[in-house]
Amino acid sequence: MRPPKVVIVAQSFKESIAAPAVAEALDVAARTAGATPIVLRASDGGDGLLEALTPCLVRFTKYQVEDPLRRLIEAPVGWLAERTAVIESRLACGLSLLAPHERDPLVTTTRGVGALIRRAVADGADRVFVGLGGSATVDGGLGMARDWGWAPVDGAGQPLAEGGGALATLARLGEGTRPTAHLVGLCDVATVLTGPRGARVFAAQKGASPAATTRLAAGLERLAEVANAAGAGPVAQVPGAGAAGGLGFGLAFFGNGELVAGAPWVLERVGFSRALTDADLVVVAEGAFDETSLEGKLSGVVISLAREAGVAVLLIAPTATHVPAEVIVESGGGWWSAADVTRRGAQAVSRALRLLGH
C-alpha cells in the first residue's frame, strides 16, 4: 500500500515566515506524518509571485524605480517568454519596503509600478502580467499613471499631491499615454474599488487610522467619478478593481488592462490540477485566515479547487475564522515560528490522515 499523497501549497506568512521556510517546514511535517508530499510554491498575485513562477521564467531583469515614498530602489521583472513580462507590484509599492512607522497610505504612491511597466515595455514586452497584492498604497493607481504622464489637478488647477490622501480634491485628469503592451492584473482579491466592501477594507493593514480610511474611501469615490466622466464606465465595480489599494482600477482605466483572479492563474502554471490526481489530502497554510481569504486569496481558492476535485483539505493557520465547514483546521496560539509550523503541521497531517482512514 502506497503512503498517502499530500499536496502542499506553500506561501509566506505575511511579515513573519518567508515562503521557502513555510514550504520546507510543511514538507518535513508531511514526511514526519508518513506521507509523500508534493510541495508547490504559489501566490495569488501578492507576496511570492515571482518566486512561485521561477521555474516557468526564462530570465530576470532589474530596473531602478521609486519605492512608495519615492526613494530609489532596484526591482526585478520576470519574463515568461521573450515578449511576456511579469511584475510583482509589491516589490515597487509594497509594505515590505517600508518600516512600520513609515506606513501611511495617505502619502504612499504606486509610481514605481508605472516605471516598471514602462521599462519592461521599452525592453520589448508586448504583454505584461502585474501581480496585485501586498501594497502599501491606496492611490487608485494614480501614482502609476503619473509615471505615464497623467497630470491630476485640484479645483484651483494645482497639481495634486502624491498618495491617496489628496484624491478627494481631484478635479480633473490631464491625460497621459497608455502602455502599448497588453496589461493583465493578477488580483489577490475580488474586491471592487468603492463602497463598504471596496479597497477601504484593507486600508488599516497599510497603516491607515479610521479617520484616514474614511478620507481614502472618499478619495477613491472621487477618482471613480472623475474617471467615469472621462469615459471609464463601470470600471470601479469590476471585481479586482480594489486590489492593491485600487491599483487594479488603475491598470484597467489608465492602462486599458484586464483584471483576472491571480490565484487560479498561478496555480495553473505551477501544476496544481495535475498534482491533485490521486491526492489524499491538500494542505494549505496562511498566517491569518479570515473572511477576506475567501474573496480571491490563495488559501480560499486552493480550498475551493480541492473541494471541487473531491480532495480533503487541511488548513494550517495561527489564526483562523470563517473557515468552510468541511475543512480540517490546525490553528491557535498566535505567532508561530517555522519550527512551530513543522511540529504542529506534522500533528495536524497525522490527525487529518487518521480522520480520512489512512
Image: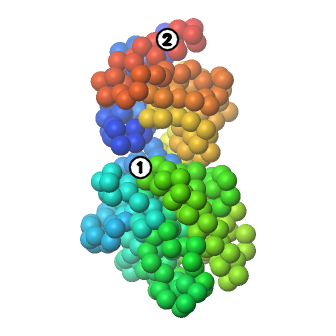
Residue at left offset 36%, top offset 33%? 22
Q: Residues within 10 Å of mark 2 (few under 14, many from 20)?
A: some
Residue at left offset 53%, top offset 57%? 211
Looking at the rendered structure, the kind of residue marked 1 is Asp
Q: What is the secondary structure assignment of the residue under circle 2?
A: helix
Left or right of 257 in this view: 124: left
**Vertical arrangement, residue 110 with respect to residue 55, above or below:** below
Percent coordinates x, y for residue 306 in the rendering: 60, 32
Q: What is the secondary structure assignment of the residue under circle 1?
A: loop
Give the residue number, with chain letter if any, for mark 2: 351
The foreground one among 323 and 42 is 323
Give the residue number, with chain letter if any, for mark 1: 47
Percent coordinates x, y for residue 272 in the rendering: 52, 39
The foreground one among 316 and 49 is 316
Percent coordinates x, y for residue 25 in the rendering: 33, 27
Left or right of 328 in this view: 118: left
The disc placed on residue 178 is none
